Amino acid sequence: MTIKSANREINKLTVNVEVEKEVFEAGISKAYLKNRKYIAVPGFRKGKAPRKMIENLYGAQVFHADAVEEIFPDVFKEAVIDQGWKPVGQPSVTDMNVREDKSLELTIEVELYPEIELGQYKGVEAPKAAVAVSDEEVEAELDRKANEVARVVTVERPAQDGDTVVIDYVGLKEGVAFEGGSAEGYELRLGSHSFIPGFEEQLVGVCAGEQKELNISFPEDYHAKELAGAPVVFQVKVHEIKETQVPAKDDELAKDVSEFDTIEELRADLRKQIEARKEEEAKRSYETALMEKISENAKLEVPASMIDDEIDNELQNFDYQLRAQGMSLEQYSKMLGGDLSGFKNSLRPSAEKQVRLRVVLNAIAEAEHIEATEEDLSAEYAQLAEQYKIDVEKIKTIVPEQDIATDLKVRKARDLVMNEAIAVAPAEKE
């Protein structure tokens, strides 16, 4: 094979090659042997017609396309990979020409791993919020704990805001029940604002066993057009009134919801938990800001095929999660009011950012001569084996070492950026 020309334009490589007639002939022979059983020739059983007979009947070029498929992997390797190019995505043959001497001329196009010019990645500044925990936040968390062990008891008194009423109701518009306007044994928390305005407010003061008519108008912007702005009557029967009894925030509560003996010990622990959570959130935001900066500082163009691959990977992972919940990607897309194609397009901006950042981190790892050691690889395989409860040797057959090494180098590059970065106070909000 002879490479006649190779031209790179940004991330696209176009290679023109000449394949010897002997190589092309070998490809044609393989194509003939593979396809002859599918070709009908008068006077011959399928699979028994000679190659020349088939070519005379259907044309000399009948096996050319399949012959190119047969020889293409070796041609592509020699013309692109062995020349040091880094292809991404699927290559395509944009032109083929069989010469008079039976040699073959091919034009191949493929996207290449992007060239990159790194910008600043050491000493990058990014805002990192200072972490502080207020007494109000601690009390809110303590209130949540108390509500988790609250008791709901039936009471014999008029309903108050915050009570739960058990009711049957029927909604009537111009004396006729409308769809979706009735229920039996419904438990409604007064003050929850889960019903249209006026409904819950008119039930404050009712008693168990009472029946009441509620005169209400639906909001003008109500989603059901036939009810928007319409005056209606709800006939309500009250069966039961329940009160939520939240325990006092004292030592007994601390013993009920934690391993602590006193409420002050619980408060101190909750403060630590909130602080740790905020620290983690601040760290994530700081890291995100740093990664965005080093990505913006670099100069590169991301090939479309790399973005498409990232979208496909995201979709595959999301599809696994959905199927575990009994739903498909198509159903999820329709729930969002679109189709799968629209959902894929919505992922494109974030996928491009992810690919761009990965290329930048790979380039940093190369610039800093970062490598994944044998100890690193062994530890990573052991961690994966533990995570998925699979033997280490089995994991090695599933996840290629090269993929593990690349991920490790990217992580080390990320750590380098983080360790060299400078945290600054966030800008004051106007």
Image (spheres, helix red, strand yellow):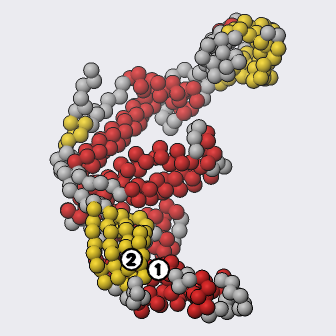
Residue visible at 54% across and 48% down in the picture? 341
Tag of residue 106: 2
- Cα–Cα span, label 2 and label 1: 9 Å
How many numbered tags mark residues here? 2
Residue 190, visible in the rendered structure: no
Label 2 Cα crowd, 10 Å radius (few <14 / some 14-19 / many 20+): many
Circle 1 is placed at which residue position?
A: 68
Locate the N terminus by quadrant. bottom left
Q: What's the residue at 42%, 82% (across, down)?
A: 98
- Which of pointers 2 and 1 lies earlier in the amino acid sequence? 1
Q: Position of residue 286 (x, y in %)?
A: 29, 41
- Answer with left or right where residue 155 lies relative to residue 313: right
User: Foreground residue, 132 or 423?
Assistant: 423
Could you say where residue 243 lies in the image, as x and y percent from the top left? 67, 17
Residue at left 59%, top 49%? Answer: 329
Residue 146, image x, y percentages: 55, 26
Q: Residue at x 53, y 29 (%)?
A: 145
**128 up-or-down from 71: above or below:** above
- For the residues labelled 2 and 1, say whether their Cβ atoms are less than 8 Å apart: yes
Residue 63, compared with residue 271, is above or below; it is below
Q: Is mark 1 on a helix, strand or loop?
A: helix
Q: Residues within 10 Å of mark 1 (few under 14, many from 20)?
A: some
Q: What residue type is labelled 2?
A: Leu
Give the camera-side residue of 248 and 39. 39
Is 341 left, or right, of 98 in this rendering?
right
